[in-house]
Image (cartoon, grey):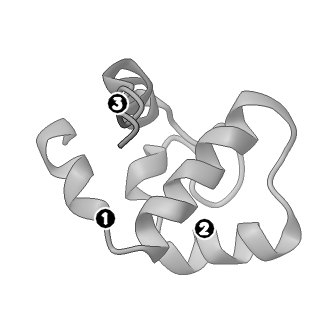
Amino acid sequence: MEPSPAFNHKALIDLAAMRMPFGKYEGMRLIDLPEPYVVWFHSQGFPEGKLGQMLGTVYEIKVNGLEYLFDPLR
């Protein structure tokens, strides 16, 4: 059995601190964006770079019902 990859706590903390830099939800933490907005963004395509990667992570967490991971970070 292969060992599971190490969980990246810093990445989760960085994700919790990141705020939406533009649009209707400007200034809101990415982890607090409404799920329908994140799903819409997924269908339109996330922006390039770190913001897009972070939004993609938020999308995966939200659609898979793992939002409880954000609770200790709020």
**The quarter of the displayed image where residue 61 is located:** bottom left
Task: Tell me the number on the disc at residue 7.
Answer: 3
Residues at marks 1 and 2 touching, judged by CB atoms closer than 8 Å: no
Label 2, label 3: how far apart the Cα atoms are: 23 Å
- Of the two numbered discs 1 and 2 in the rendering, the one whose residue sits closer to the viewer: 1
Residue at 40 percent of width and 37 percent of height: 2
Q: Position of residue 20 (x, y in %)?
A: 59, 42
- Of the two numbered discs 2 and 3 in the rendering, the one whose residue sits closer to the viewer: 3
The mark total stands at: 3
**Other-residue count near label 3 (Cα within 10 Å), few / some / many at <14 / 14–19 / ≥20:** few
Outermost residue, front side: 1
The amino acid on which the numbered mark 3 sits, given as a three-letter code, is Phe
Q: Position of residue 63 (x, y in %)?
A: 47, 75
Q: Which residue is mark 1?
A: 66
Secondary structure beneath disc 1?
A: loop
28 on left or right of 37: left
> Vertically, is 22 above or below 49?
below
**Other-residue count near label 2 (Cα within 10 Å), few / some / many at <14 / 14–19 / ≥20:** many
Task: Tell me the number on the disc at residue 38.
Answer: 2
